[in-house]
Image (cartoon, grey):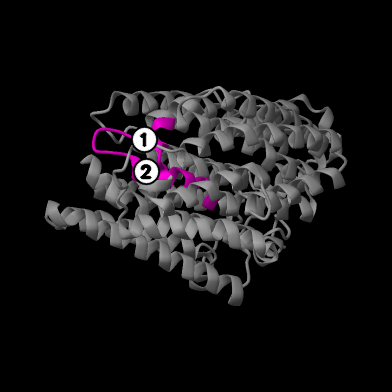
Amino acid sequence: MIPPGTDLSYSWTQALNDLGQISPIVAVTGFFLLAIVTDLVLPRSRRGGAVAMVAVVGFAYSLGTVLYRWVYATGGYAYHRFATGDNFALFFELLFASLGILTVALSHSYLKRRGLLESEFHILVMAAVIGMMVLGSATSLVTVFLGLELLSISLYIMCGFARADFRSQEAAAKYLLVGGFASAFVLYGMALIYGGAGTTVIPDIAQRLGSSSSANPLILLGILLMGVGFAFKVSAAPFHMWTPDVYQGAPIPVTAFMSVGTKAAAFAMIVRVFAGGLPHLAPEWQTLLAFVAATSMVVGNLMAITQSSLKRLLAYSGVAQAGYVLIGVIAGGSDGLRAVLYYLFVYMFMNFGAFAVLTLLSGRDGDADSFADLEGLGRRNPVLAVAMTIFMLSLAGFPPSVGFFGKLFLFTAGVGAGYTWLVVVAVLMSVVSVFYYVKVLIPVWSPSPRVERVPASLSSAATIVLSGAASILLGLYPTTLLIAGQLGAGPINPP
């Protein structure tokens, strides 16, 4: 809601400034519309490749816009403080545009192999990325909810994209029901915060709600409801029940995209709303998130040990990883936020890369989802075997991978903020996680009579090689990305 007394007069200068602040989102939106037109006018035989090219060019153009604004432009508010183009938003737009390129490159050959509609898939990916970018740049509860729903609706459809596969339809139905349930929690919590603060603009909420608001039951209930809804979206325990089933049933490129993008967008939302809008009520939401973090790490790691499905194993791994990232959110400050941004960015490479390897192992009849599918991979395709080893060791936190430095930064920020007990839980659970990550590698390098090669298209191979290289190089030189994280970890609310 626009605050009373706001000047609603609008000039061309303001319009151009507003468009400039959200130009990365505008770029993807423009190419999204172009992709729809391309799909309508071209013959079916040429649609898939053409729309994929439009999507990649759109994401690349958005990426260039992000880099240009990061170097030459100044971030500020847009559209009566409903959005912003600050460094925090630019960091997530950089992440989401990169993820979009990786997803399109990976899914091109998979969709052809499975006989799925390609152009529609890439259009849905673009729509989901737009929703993610909106979440990263939102500075109003209204804008947050719009971005959340655009992202969620796109993912509901993508999860059920394999229309002839019962498991895919089941995953879409479960995600739709649970996602709607979570959205209701978020919306009701936002309504209560609006009722207590009298505005939906996040910086204004921070000004109007002081520490004395901790005695207001309306505000406390709003924090609780939003926290529950956010935990659903980020796949954090004990609100993670949908994650293993949806990850297992959805097509693997969708699972790979969701496992990184949804988590990063949800954390952008959490930081904006809680750290940016409710800083004076930090003890209340930090207590809630600390409980969720500890539960996620314990449940995620212990449940992953018992899994025989690779998708479900990585789903529970994602639940545990959400707990690690929450440590940085709880710690707050520049150190905590910088650690969160670093880990979310490198998580894109190591987790997406693991799913990318499984994508290449998938056949015409279904996805690779068992340990038997990995048997003899070291002989069948040594490059994929080495890449899978890098991804698993990175997720486990072995030095000098990005996973090691990511956890180091998160745990250091947690100790510095006084949450030593939470870091102790995280370290113990990290040790437990080594078991199931190494368990994945046993069939990869075990002797096997299987000799058939695992083919890889140029785009898929490039995606995996790039992810593997980033998982190593960004660990050997972590300061490179940490500097970008430092820039993105500036004030959540622009001046």
- Residue 438, position in %: x, y? 58, 37
Label located before the other in sequence (1 or 2): 2
Q: Secondary structure at mark 1?
A: loop
Q: Residue at x 42, y 23 (%)?
A: 174
User: Which residue position holds label 2?
Assistant: 359
Q: Quadrant of the N terminus?
A: top right
Q: Is residue 493 left or right of residue 346?
A: right
Q: Is residue 59 magenta?
A: no
Callout count: 2
Give the magenta part as a residue range. Answer: 348-377
- Residue 312, position in %: x, y? 48, 29
Q: Residue at x 13, y 53 (%)?
A: 45
Contact, mark 1 vs mark 2 (Cβ under 8 Å)? yes
Q: Quadrant of the C terminus?
A: bottom right
- Residue 345, position in %: x, y? 59, 54
Q: Residue at x 66, y 67 (%)?
A: 480
Q: Secondary structure at mark 2?
A: helix
Q: Is residue 335 shown to the viewer in this render?
A: yes
Q: Residue at x 64, y 48 (%)?
A: 201
Q: Does 439 appear above or below 242?
A: below
The one of 39 and 405 positioned closer to us in this rendering? 405
Rendered image: mark on residue 429: none
Q: Is residue 491 left or right of residue 152?
A: right
Answer few, some or many: residues within 10 Å of disc 2's Cα (few below 14, many 20 plus, some between 14 and 19). many
Q: Does 291 appear above or below 1?
A: above
Q: Amino acid at mark 2?
A: Thr
Q: Is residue 487 left or right of residue 132?
A: right
User: Which residue position holds label 1?
Assistant: 368
The one of 56 and 109 positioned closer to us in this rendering? 109
Q: Amino acid at mark 1?
A: Ala
